[in-house]
Image: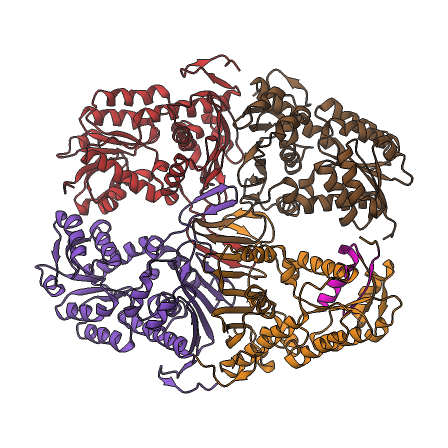
Chain colours: A red, B brown, C orange, D purple
Amino acid sequence: MSTKKLQVGVAGLGRMGKRHALNFHQNVPRATLIAVSSPDAAERQWAAENLAPHGVAVYESYDDMLSHNGLEAVCVASATSVHAEQAIKAVEKGKHVLCEKPLGTTVEVSQTVVDAASKRPELKVMCGFSRRFDASYRDAHAKMQQGLIGRPAVLRSQTCDVLDPSGFFVAYAEFSGGIFVDCSIHDIDLALWFFDEEKSKVKSVHAVGITAVEPDLRKHNDRDNAVGTVEFYDGRIAYLYASRMMAAGQEDSTEIIGTKGKLSVNILPADNHVRIYQPGGIRQELPQTYWDRFKAAFTTEAIEFTDSVLEDKPVPIKLASAVSAVKIGAALQESMVKGTKIWFDEQGNRTDRAQL
Amino acid sequence: MSTKKLQVGVAGLGRMGKRHALNFHQNVPRATLIAVSSPDAAERQWAAENLAPHGVAVYESYDDMLSHNGLEAVCVASATSVHAEQAIKAVEKGKHVLCEKPLGTTVEVSQTVVDAASKRPELKVMCGFSRRFDASYRDAHAKMQQGLIGRPAVLRSQTCDVLDPSGFFVAYAEFSGGIFVDCSIHDIDLALWFFDEEKSKVKSVHAVGITAVEPDLRKHNDRDNAVGTVEFYDGRIAYLYASRMMAAGQEDSTEIIGTKGKLSVNILPADNHVRIYQPGGIRQELPQTYWDRFKAAFTTEAIEFTDSVLEDKPVPIKLASAVSAVKIGAALQESMVKGTKIWFDEQGNRTDRAQL
Amino acid sequence: MSTKKLQVGVAGLGRMGKRHALNFHQNVPRATLIAVSSPDAAERQWAAENLAPHGVAVYESYDDMLSHNGLEAVCVASATSVHAEQAIKAVEKGKHVLCEKPLGTTVEVSQTVVDAASKRPELKVMCGFSRRFDASYRDAHAKMQQGLIGRPAVLRSQTCDVLDPSGFFVAYAEFSGGIFVDCSIHDIDLALWFFDEEKSKVKSVHAVGITAVEPDLRKHNDRDNAVGTVEFYDGRIAYLYASRMMAAGQEDSTEIIGTKGKLSVNILPADNHVRIYQPGGIRQELPQTYWDRFKAAFTTEAIEFTDSVLEDKPVPIKLASAVSAVKIGAALQESMVKGTKIWFDEQGNRTDRAQL
Amino acid sequence: MSTKKLQVGVAGLGRMGKRHALNFHQNVPRATLIAVSSPDAAERQWAAENLAPHGVAVYESYDDMLSHNGLEAVCVASATSVHAEQAIKAVEKGKHVLCEKPLGTTVEVSQTVVDAASKRPELKVMCGFSRRFDASYRDAHAKMQQGLIGRPAVLRSQTCDVLDPSGFFVAYAEFSGGIFVDCSIHDIDLALWFFDEEKSKVKSVHAVGITAVEPDLRKHNDRDNAVGTVEFYDGRIAYLYASRMMAAGQEDSTEIIGTKGKLSVNILPADNHVRIYQPGGIRQELPQTYWDRFKAAFTTEAIEFTDSVLEDKPVPIKLASAVSAVKIGAALQESMVKGTKIWFDEQGNRTDRAQL
């Protein structure tokens, strides 16, 4: 094992960007955070106070950061709308890339990243689907592969955020791609992983949604609660729920139901091992954010991405998979908005109606 | 409180009929089981051994049982295909009726029972949706009505039977009406109850299904795993899962998600308060059948039906509700088989496409 | 199976007496409640309103009730201080007896009931240790007997009541025999049952107690929280916790730890299958009283006692066992009050100090 | 924040030593592991392969390691019998010390470390009670301090290891100080922490123990299952269970019962968020070792110890507390072996019998 460290820059210092920057700075022994960039002055101020003292360069311009001396890899954690563009620039400059999900809000945009990466096969380019790095999901996946549940046939999965009464999600919806592309993308990725996307091809998608707490989301063709169904040609079903309305905290649960058993992940969320007994009953607290639930997974993700570069190993998730996920997510969003069921043939092309 | 007891007969002595007969015999202090009927010789033999010694008359013919001296009420627990016919005959003979769900496998047949009952308003006629009598569902419903979760917006519910490798379900499917009419009918009824069917009118239904373990179910247009979505005009969603493939036991769970909180019922099933610690972990056993899970509810159902007759009170569930449930269940079944999304207008008529 | 019904009277109509009376009245098909007695006018008034209309005779004098025409069995549910006296009177009058625990607050008094019963072997006399009739404890006991946990070696058990700020427990302590005789008696009985009292002889007991919320309990040599240890000659330990201070509800939990596994009963109490998700977390409510937790067990107890009389079968719990339980409970109470460890020889006699 | 890193050596490379060494190497950004020592050749071989390539010096002699150039702090993770001696040597050489628990197996030996440390107040010397660094225990402690449960009155805590049929624990018992000093020391430390050792002085201890699976433990005056009770002068009780016999995995649970509520930590252990549904029920796996359960706490411990040195802050746990814990543990062990209850006066001296 070499003692060389990967020189990393983080693009974007918003909610997720800050976390990725601190994560690379504190929790990845084989990486050194050397630069960050953000067009936002307040975010740069935060970096000036928290990262610069440790020798991290702070840039306003992403392009300038890309030219930082010695930079080897970029973690793209900016707004979704610039994910693809920034990832491609980095690739073209010869940098390895860990890109936050999704690559883009459309298949076309997402595919441009894959195309760019395919021209530079020596670079490691990965879209970070954090759940694949979570210890519990990995345990479940390993147990499934050992045959513990027979053939997995039905997957139920949800990504449900705590209610944020500030209106944040309305503004956010303008560029997020919608609740299926932003939230359910995680659950879709799980379906691709547990069902094996090489074998399971999407046959149809259908979705419905409501605005129970944020009617203004409709301005951006979005909803605050949505249910989607994905049918696969090889006789499998994934059904998904996404919400911005949870009262108790972040509730990301998954069930994988097979012909001989079932695995559940986080069916009854809890933040830690504490229970509180008071008049009214026994209570357990929940993680309040996606990051709280998955912070250890983000660390594993950053460590394994770093390892794949330093040791020239394949990245843990194929980049093309990220395009498949966006394809399904965007189709679900369209189905929800238009009220139509959407069909695909076995080659993945849209079709009027599948033969039953 | 009078000490008069209701004189009850039970029609059908199959799996459920036996249970209903014993239930009325042992657990309903204000009722006396006086007669049972079954066209099946083995079932009558069982009754001869277990019920006749306690003074219960055993009939081959349902019509003959209806003429039994002193009979006041009938519990129809025969095959689904004769529910309606038997219920109507009983009504026409002036008997109160507790009918197992569903009234019929089609809306038209189910409606005939309502029509017959409406001509005899002095009779108590109820379709037994057992979950409405379960202490946990009642507690959840009461908490919802107290406003604990704000406005209920999304309901997830499942009725999932343990895997029965005997092939029982294939034969059963010929007359059951299909998995949505047989299993999900319970979850549909919960949606009607929690969302208030007076206010929430169905806008669309969509379903998909697979045969993961019982391909022969397709002969009867049925599936062993199915997922359905029901959209309501007032901005609510119910999504349902039914299965014949559970490995661990009966898994009937429900979540009611409101704008200010959530209630779950049986999210982590357990048969009792015991946990078993062995190499491999901590284990809790599950009820193996629907009856095991809901037997106390069936007793409450029988007690309350009996009370409604003896005290001339309204039955706890309006009969028309049972038709609404079949309407939704049958539409889901059709959607699953045909692959189409089905729309309704606000008057409950099918329509080509709702206006969005 | 005969259709004859056991004619039952209930002595005492306090908190438990009312419940036993209603239990026999409503839930025991083979018994008929025909008489009750209470020296308390308010309690008799309750009976006049709730039981008399159903043909139940109401007596002020217990002796008078014993002479009620046709009375066959008595359920003694009066104050602990008269349990033994009333049970003996009933036996001497030739009545079967189901006596609430404990038989008495001392070994000597408890033994008088056993002596009286031994002179009338044709009568069924049982002390009602309700937990032996609970479905979960029975399941655990059966699993232990099947060898699931190897040899049971350590038993942890607790009987913990919800905090009652009314001061009820102070007055109650004057006659209850103290927290070990009143509460832990259940846990002691479990130890005798799971360890097999024929084989496991008590070697030593030790206890400590505090008054965390009710200092006035010290007037009656009692405490509101107490921990006891019971050591057995065959290398087993039971350790017990009793409390009058639970905030969330009734918490009666037990663990049986064997050489190859462990069984727990009610390790995480819950009143039903509902969970409530609100800001602050996920909450489950608890039963608030011992009766709430064990009401089904009390019904089973009454049914099985009735069956043992009607079918002339042995009662489910040997009467002598109730004396053993009081012996241990009273010794624990003494150890707690005096601060001493108390030793027994293998014949059950107190001794200065066991040989180690 | 300085970028200086603490130069750390680890003494002992047995089970725990390896873990501490890797922990400092991989998980503590502000520390650099520069040296390790072990008298055991196989352990040194492991270090030669796993640590030396990263620049870590490997010593046979602890004294030689102490002289390693630049060494600033030592983590003592060797056999319990040399903890005190090695800690004192390090202090005398001017090194900061993080010592695995217990300081020694007797009060006298443990006190020598405190005495040595008190002569070098500029050094940070801490005994590592890992549970004080666990997120769940910290959350519980914070909630208690916020008054959530009123005044804590009773603490139940257990340290229960998985059954190890290899006989490891017999050999280990020769030097471990016994099950109360080796295992329950954690629970005792929790009592000192939650009850506030400044206020709560021990009044009596009592313990019993058995050898259910390892009779050979008696050779070393030890047991495989033990229950202890600790009574405090200010009206509090801690009761403890330690075992080497768990079937399912590591079971370290704690309850803190206060006058207004209760907190539990890990009442139902689980290794992760996965549940497995198979015939037989729903199962959750457990951590198999103490390290598996607390590895994150060990990292926090190492990080906070490092911070306390680099920033010259008090260590998170007062060193004298470690002597108090050994005092109670050793008295419990003595009580168990001799069969006697042991009393202390309020100054902490043994006494014949406390005044009640």
Give coordinates of residue C329: x percent, y percent.
58, 75
Relative image position of residue D157 (x, y in whole percent): 43, 64
Q: Is residue C57 left or right of residue D156?
A: right
D264 sits to left or right of B250: left
Q: Residue C320: name its quadrant.
A: bottom right
Q: Is residue A60 left or right of residue C188?
A: left
All told, the count of numbered labels is: 0
In this rendering, is residue A282 above or below A262?
below
Tell me, yes or no, if residue B315 can be seen here: no
Describe residue A121's horizontal placement relative to residue A262 as left or right: left
In the depicted view, which residue is nearer to us: A55 or A281? Answer: A281
Q: Position of residue C267 (x, y in %)?
A: 52, 57
Query: Is residue C193 part of the magenta span, yes or no?
Result: no
Q: Residue at x 80, y 46 (%)?
A: B307
Name the quadrant containing residue C304: bottom right
| Residue drawn at point x = 45 percent, y = 67 percent | D155
Residue C175: x percent and y percent? Answer: 66, 78
At 36% across and 58% down in the image, what residue appears? D165
Task: Please give the range of residues in magenta.
Answer: C4-30
Asked whether residue C62 appears in the rendered view, the answer is: yes
Q: Quadrant of the C terminus of chain B?
A: top right
Tell me if residue C63 comes above or below residue B112 in the rendering.
below
Observer-nearest of C273 and D149: C273
Residue C20 sits inside the magenta stretch: yes
Q: Residue lying furthest right in this view?
A: B69
Q: Is residue A95 above or below residue A32?
A: above
Which of D44 and A279 lies nearest the eye of the viewer?
Answer: D44
